[in-house]
Amino acid sequence: MSWIKIVMDKDCAETLIVIVGKSDDGYKSLIQLLMEEEYKGITIKSIKKLEAYLSWEECMAVLIDIDTVPVENRKVRELTVQYSHTPFLCMSDKNYHPKLKETICYHVYACINKSIDPDELFYLLRSIRDDSQ
């Protein structure tokens, strides 16, 4: 858990996107895309590790890969209440997640397709930044 020891300054937290997912190599291109637009990205492999991280550090947003990380409506609701200042987004290859209907409707800022459209992603991130100001 060496990532917990990272001390983030406020400027870093304002541009940090935490990606939660189990793909070992799948997020490198996403992190590179974020870096091109002066955001920072880190990956965390589980909701439990995300909770530990958020208890120590702040971030601009959390992006959960709901295809690779098991997550339930109740857990997302708890996270969004406990870390109400942090917007949660989801990404998926699938268009429909009946078991996560409540989460996607009420607790998640947005759900985006995994073949990520940079324009859509950066529009959402600008919206999050504007909402927090």
Image: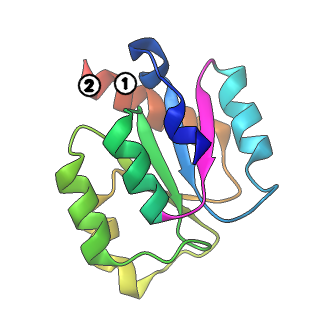
Marks 2/1 in contact by CB < 8 Å: the verdict is yes
User: At x 55% / y 71%, what residue is drawn?
Assistant: 69
The residue segment tinted magenta is 38-46
- Please identify the quadrant where the C terminus is shown: top left
Q: Is 41 colored magenta in this rendering? A: yes
Q: Is residue 37 above or below residue 117?
A: above
Could you tell me if residue 117 is visible in this image? yes
Amino acid type at image mark 1: Arg
Can you tell which mark lies on residue 129? 1
Say few, some or many: other residues with alpha carbon within 10 Å of mark 1 (under 14 / 14 to 19 / 20 or more).
some
Q: Secondary structure at mark 1?
A: helix
For the residue pair 32 and 57, the one nearer the viewer reads as: 57
Q: Position of residue 130 (x, y in %)?
A: 32, 22
Residue at the disc numbered 2? 132
Amino acid type at image mark 2: Ser
Apparent side of residue 26 relative to residue 59 in the rendered image (left or right): right
Say few, some or many: other residues with alpha carbon within 10 Å of mark 2 (under 14 / 14 to 19 / 20 or more).
few
User: At x 72% / y 22%, what residue is drawn?
Assistant: 36
Apparent side of residue 3 relative to residue 88 in the rendered image (left or right): right
